[in-house]
Image (cartoon, grey):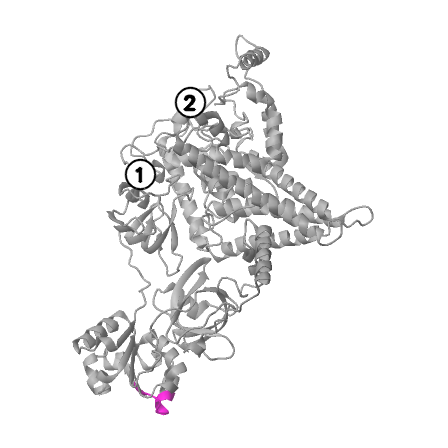
Amino acid sequence: MTATLNRLAPSRRPARLAGLLDGARKVAEAIATPLVPSDYLDLIDPLRAGAELRGRIVSVAHETADAATITIRPGKGWLGHRPGQYIRIGIDIDGVRHWRAYSLTHRADASDGLISITTKAIPDGKVSNHLVRQATPGTLVMLDQATGDFTLPQAVPAKALFLTAGSGITPVIGMLRNHLGELPDVAHVHCAPTEADVIFREELRGYAAASRLTLHENHDDVAGILDLASLDDLVPDWREREVWVCGPTGLLDAAEAHWAEAGLAELLHVERFRPSIIEPGEGGSVTFEASGVTVDADGSTPILDAGEAAGVLMPSGCRMGICFGCVVTMRDGAVRDLRSGEITVADESTTGTKIQTCINAVAGRCDIEL
Amino acid sequence: MTLAPERTRTTPTTSAPTTPGINSRLSVTSAEPRPQRPEFKKSGRPNPAAHLSAEQIEEIGRELDALRQEVLDSRGAKDAAYIRKVIKTQRYIEMGSRAALLFSGVKVKGVRPMWWLGTAGLSVAKILENMEIGHNVMHGQWDWMRDPKIHSTAWEWDNASPSSQWKHSHNEIHHTFTNVLGRDNDLGYGILRVDEDQKWTLFYLFQPIWHVANALLFEYSIAAYDLELGGYLAKKNRMSDEDKAKFRADAQEVVTKIKRQATKDYLVHPAMAAATFTGSTRHTLTANIVANLVRNVWTNTVIICGHFPPGIETFEKASIEGETRGDWYLRQMLGSGNISGSKAMHVMTGNLSHQIEHHLFPDLPSNRYAEIAPRIRDLMDRNDLKYVSGNLAKQVGGVYWKVVELSLPPKREGTTRRATILRAAKRAVRGKGGAGRRY
């Protein structure tokens, strides 16, 4: 697994060279002020070493009617990943940057240096629909380094079970593609609405045909939703297996209950992606994280007023939405613009979503970084 | 710099009495019945909005809100591509010009072509950076893209004034209290009398000089203005330690910014030119000085056309009590003026040539002002309001004439202007002020 990390070994440079480089950096900064040198260098090569991590879409290949694998050439700063991990990807849709997390599905030892994610378009999913249906090769996207601990351990288990549903196959296909050869005994139960919806169907069946794993496909429209009690028949030795589960919340909750009941919770690994659809409400609770204050506010009270009333030190200005002096970071939740009714939902970027507090009221709940 | 104004500390107290905490300007309707505007202002000049009823003003508010929403709904990838293209173009022009200046000392047939090319390019680059990019990004016009690099909270501009201080005095004070005498210090920047309702003092007698000096040194006077240097100098003996500490921290920020800017333009780039051994050091230095002067004079020219030309209205402090969104819109329309011209001119002014549209919707992307301008003009025509607009020469000429005309005291019954000036001069000589308070 460590082989996939192509982190550059820090070379010890002579002190004089380091001093020169530091001087050159200072001169470059003096030239670029009030910008930074990278603002100019990014024009020429946005994927260069030392740049903020970005990637360029190389291809979009359809897996099923509503799922596609997006192959990306990452910038030179890409540090590699362990199969099963995910990345956050920031893509501009209608001019607005949206961040979402997707599992990496490519072979980590591929020599072309490309990475890929596989996305299933979910109903009303702005980013997933865009990636599957509209994204075009050549598009520049923002990336974060790989993260997540839904991975295989250094010492691979003697017996493994993968339990996946829908696009929950994506982190697992990454593990299978990279480590199937090292895993002595693998059982895989995968659920999808119909046969045609099974992402990586031919590949999975290929592994099964070659006896590299035992595969059970549950087509929900035909067989009904998988009952975990049927594991006793499908994988009789499931209690002896270390298990990785990824899929919708219902499956994850059921698996946690099932393994806990069997007293085998320590064998269970689950991957929970935060649901990206927040149901915006009218009013709700506002949490000011740094201040440690949570208040309830109605749907017509600006967050600025709610915060001030609670004694939070709020930046403010015109109080009518024009000066942008009150802009703060929303980490989570949703707010509604009191002028237009427009909803802003926090996305999955690490930097959070910037909002004006003087013209936004909480819509459901929100966490403010203050 | 003593050009900065004495400023009143502004703590916005504009909430409607019935809905404590919530700004009355958030709504087009008023919780309280709004009084009909008097036909004449205190100065005796006619009130330009006296003919409109509260309901009509409410309707104007609704119409403008709807227009704003229309632009928001159609804002998208094309707009994002526009600002990125402008930024990219500006950076390439800057890099190209800087590269040309490395050889600015090379003489060909008696002229230095690289100096001319580099200086022109650098001037254009600095103007684009300050106007179409810096000013508008710092207004939050592009915050909706959620690009942390093109965001009001992150942008720092190629100007002596640090962006945080500029955003406070410009976005918050000027845009909220546009053209309200005693609240909006942009009205003459505290050194010019550009409206008859501004009280005359002896200081203004020399305002043609102040005006030219201000234009040449515009970035520094803006920095002093944003820092509230004039107010500090006038009031430092009465200021609390806390306020003084705040001023010192702000001043330190300005000094650091100016140092960085000057190091870049007047030290590092000339030094790099020295490395080409073409005798270009001195010429790179002069090119940077000229480019900064050109930028200063041009930005000043555009700015004075926004609120000072003849026909633009000013407002009294009392008139904005409990102001609704419609009232605020009305004040923005009457308190701003446009410059007509080519597309290139609009870009070079940062679309501040659409000052009326910008003041109505300071956070809408600047590339959209041109398309809504005819509809704003139509709305104002329908409501019998004057849409002030003219070409650059006309607007600039109007302001310069005003600067000269209003340097003299107003004519009063029973005395002559000469007598007023002499009286003020005598008072000043005796040290009884006369040049101090300007509102």
Depth check: give the residue in front, A57 or A11: A11
Quarter of the rendering occupied by the N terminus of chain B: top right
Question: Bounds of the magenta span?
Answer: A206-215
Depth check: give the residue in front, A317 or A322: A317
Instruction: Look at label 1 and name its amino acid.
Output: Ile
Task: Give me the residue at 51% from left, 70% from top.
Answer: A137
Q: Which numbered disc covers residue B39?
A: 2
- In the shown orientation, is residue B138 left or right of residue B13? right
Q: Which numbered disc covers residue B287?
A: none
Residue B300: percent from the left, percent from the top? 58, 36
Disc 1 marks which residue? B22
How dense is the environment of label 1, judged by Cα within 10 Å: few (below 14), some, or many (20 and up)? Answer: many
Residue A269 appearing in the image: yes
- In the shown orientation, is residue B219 left or right of residue B112? left
Marked residue nearer the N-terminal end (1 or 2): 1
Given the current orientation, which residue lies at the most extreme bottom position? Answer: A210
How dense is the environment of label 2, judged by Cα within 10 Å: few (below 14), some, or many (20 and up)? Answer: some
Residue B123 appearing in the image: no
Residue B93: percent from the left, percent from the top? 63, 52
